Image (cartoon, coloured by chain):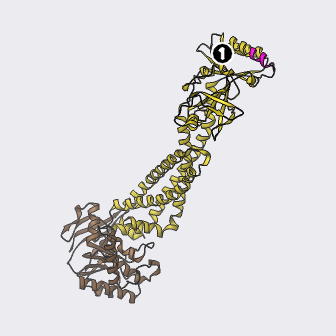
Chain colours: A yellow, B brown
Amino acid sequence: MFKHLFKLIWNKRKQNFLFLTEILISFLVVFAVFSYITYYYQNYSRPLGFDYNRVWAIAYSGEQLSKNPDTLTTFYANLEKSLKSMPEIKEVSFSHSNFPYSSSFMNRGLKYGKKDFNMINHYVVSNDYNKVWDVKLKYGRWFLPEDLVTKDKAIIINESLRQEMFGKEKGIGKIIGDEKEKLKVIGIANDFKSDGDFAPMNNIMFVQLDTANLKWTSNILIKVNETADATFESKLYKFMTSTTRSAVEIQHVDEMRASRNRTTLIPIFLFVIVAAFLIINVALGLFGVLWYNINKRKGEIGLRRAIGASGASVSLQMVLESLILTTISLLLGCFFAVQFPLLNVFAIPASVYVIAILLAILFIYTLVLACSLYPGKQAAAIHPAIALHED
Amino acid sequence: MIRLQNIEKVYRTDTVETLAINNISLDIAKGEFLSIMGPSGCGKSTLLNIMGLLDDPSKGNIVIDNQDINRFTDKKLANFRNEKLGFIFQSYHLINDLQVLDNVELPLLYRSLSAKERKELATAALEKVGLSNRLKHFPSQLSGGQRQRVAIARAIVGRPQIILADEPTGNLDSAMGNEIMDILINLNKNEGTTIVMVTHDESMAQKTHRLVRLFDGSQVQ
């Protein structure tokens, strides 16, 4: 029977062209949607690597502050003491502008042996940064004040970068970088997802904020306790404005996170809605094409009933024809889809594309099956005598 | 071979009730060649459809080859049609997207036969109707007479005991019609196939063993 159906489909290839094209386009759209969803789901399912709750980011301008490193060091030490003396504040850390959810990035490359590692998120942070964000270390330790005076600058990298650099070795104590700048790995942090719940894990490195870097500091990150309310925020605002003599902005990191997630989710929702409309149209189109085919083939259906086909086998034939046509379209669609992982398009992991291909295949088969069952049932209900008489 | 007992067929709509067949009883013996004649709309094709189990009678009983058909399920009816009955239609009802050989193989698709067996049987049937040189042609490449011969080959490929022909020469000129009639007569004579033929052509009907005339759904001869 399969051979017969293949022959019939092949001989009717011109009539089937619309169906084949419709399925092919649908598959590619569904593949794109599932690639999106799989990619973001995989990212979402990975742990953040830090705790953003009750972390506030205070942004200010450091232009009015002294440019003298010693004066600046004293200023920040006093500022830290003043902030820590407030009962609502648990931890204080200074940072450049690229802290989690800030939409600000600082990338650099690292060298280890003959290998280059690029696009590493570079965080310049003060000693209590790990306490503010509750960053956990897998191996080694966090920065100590005395690390500022060691021969080789201390560095903490994330677990994924450690695996890329050192493989099975823990990497603690390894010297990386080049002749100009040697960095000593003192700790390995858990992977860190700093750009939203749906963002990919990027490789990261933490280096210690030293006096040379203080002038670039423009953000204070504080961990507050449950008692920190709007009154405290207002008090803090006034204190920071008077201390830094600049405009100050206090942001709650959980709100920044929600905003960042919205930025990712809104385009996905729009894409899914557009795709859903397309799929609904395709489903209606498929239904229409199958319905039209059955009406056009009433004579053939009547004949098949007359020569020995039961209602169920006529129905099955209609469904099988649709599924065979779908398989042809999907084979063609898969040929295009597999190019994405093979060519590493958009630098997305191949597993995302493979899962998306499988989901899209399953979805299209389900769609076609759902759209062809009812017309198939209607075909089975065609009265052979009437069908033969009408044709 | 075929026994129709008090067959009635009524077509009903919301407002109209039409009696297409009125209390017809008919016994057709094994190996008989019977023709049915009558004016258009007198119920000839309806009666043939009922005999061919393509339509249900409103009343009455049908026995074919000593089997009471009334209790058959859809699947059993389909198998019965496949094994016992062959159909020939005035408008041939060939599938234009299939080659001649594939058209003839169609009834065998619903049997447990290998592709090779199907091909052999279909080729043999086409040889019988003189079309062994047209296996790979499509119906659109054949004349009317050739198409009807393909339809006959399709009807006989499964070696049915009964052939039901609904105006098989209706679309053909007299020469072609005679050719088709000769094939049917040979089938009846040489293979003992029971044939029931609906026709408008008196001369064709005269070539058969028995003639049944219908008028307004009733048997008048």
Left or right, B53 with reference to B135: left
Quadrant of residue A175 within the rendered picture: top right
- Magenta-tinted stretch: A63-75
Give me the residue at 79% from left, 17% from top: A245
Q: Which residue is mark 1?
A: A230
**x%, y% of residue B72?**
24, 62
Quadrant of residue A151 within the rendered picture: top right
Quadrant of residue A390 within the rendered picture: bottom left
Vertical side of A23 occupied by A163: above or below: above
- Locate the C terminus of chain A and report the quarter of the image it occupies: bottom left
Left or right, B95 with reference to B109: right
For the question of whether residue B216 can be seen, the reply is no
At numbered mark 1, what does the secondary structure look like: helix, strand or loop? helix
Label 1 sits on what residue type?
Ala
Vertical side of A346 occupied by A85: above or below: above
Q: Residues within 10 Å of mark 1 (few under 14, many from 20)?
A: few
Front in this rendered view, residue A325 or B217 = A325
Front in this rendered view, residue B212 or A209 = A209
Residue lying farthest to the left in this orientation = B66
Q: Chain of mark 1?
A: A
**x%, y% of residue A153?**
67, 26
